[in-house]
Image (cartoon, rainbow, N blue to C red):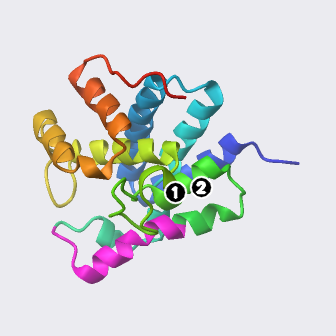
Amino acid sequence: MEIPLSDVIRTFRRFGDLHSIETEDHAVRTRTFALRIGEKLKFDSMQLLYLGYAADVHDIGKIFIDPNIIDKAGRLNKAQRTQMQKHCELGFEAMEFIHLPEEISDAILHHQEHWDGSGYPDKQKGEQIQIITRIVTIADMWDALNTDRPYRSSYSTVEAVGIMTRHQAWFDPELFAIFLSLVRGEPSPWCLRS
């Protein structure tokens, strides 16, 4: 008997929830914002389903990271940063046996990649990064900036937009325009791509 994908995702999210309530809340907020971008792009129901699942489990690898690193109140040192960056690969490896759709497993592995090639773990750039992953990357950073972290308080909306704008080379320019239209409440010129 094959287990429905939604049950598999729910099970792994539960593992994340046990590790940190912030992981659960972050996944929900990331999912909500990612789906808003997907709707602006006029994604079909299957694309939206995969986008939602990808946002749900993008950080699942953090369950394998020492909670003292996840919850550290100060800046991470180099060794801790290296350990934290492994969450992408650890999550991908943990989910590999499930045979997730590529769009979802790619988001787990590559959600820290940047449009300009400066991300990790594979230094992908531009359209080498799948579109669902590129959306999750934006939603992930937006939520991270807008919530309290152990090492800092949340930024205001204006501050968070400023930070993302300073780092806009990390993001697909079309998706970044949609992101800005959503946070500023303006219509976006990039709603025709599927």
Task: Report the amino acid beneath label 2.
Answer: Ser
On the image, which quarter does residue 62 sit in?
A: bottom left
- Res. 105 mark: 2
Mark 1 is on which residue type? Answer: Ile
Determine which quarter of the picture holds residue 152. bottom left
| Secondary structure of residue under mark 2 | helix
Question: In terms of secondary structure, what is the magenta stretch mainly?
Answer: helix
Q: Which residues are magenta?
A: 74-90
x, y percent for residue 15? 54, 57
Q: Are marks 1 and 2 in contact (CB under 8 Å)?
A: yes
Residue occupying image coordinates x 21% and y 59%: 150
Instruction: Name above or below for residue 131 compared with residue 188.
Output: below
Q: Nearer the viewer, residue 192 or 110?
A: 192
Q: Relative to the observer, which residue lies in front, 115 or 47?
A: 115
Residue 164 percent location from the top left of the image: 21, 45
Q: Secondary structure at mark 1?
A: helix
User: Residue at the spot x=23%, y=68% of the render?
Assistant: 72
**Outermost residue, right direction?**
1
Is residue 110 among the parts visible in the rendering? yes
Residue 3, relative to residue 93: is it above or below? above
Q: Which mark is residue 108?
A: 1
Residue 168 drawn above or below residue 191: below
Task: Answer with the quarter of the image where residue 165 lies.
Answer: top left
10 Å crowding of disc 1: few (<14), some (14-19), many (20+):
many
Q: Residue 23: x, y in percent?
A: 40, 52
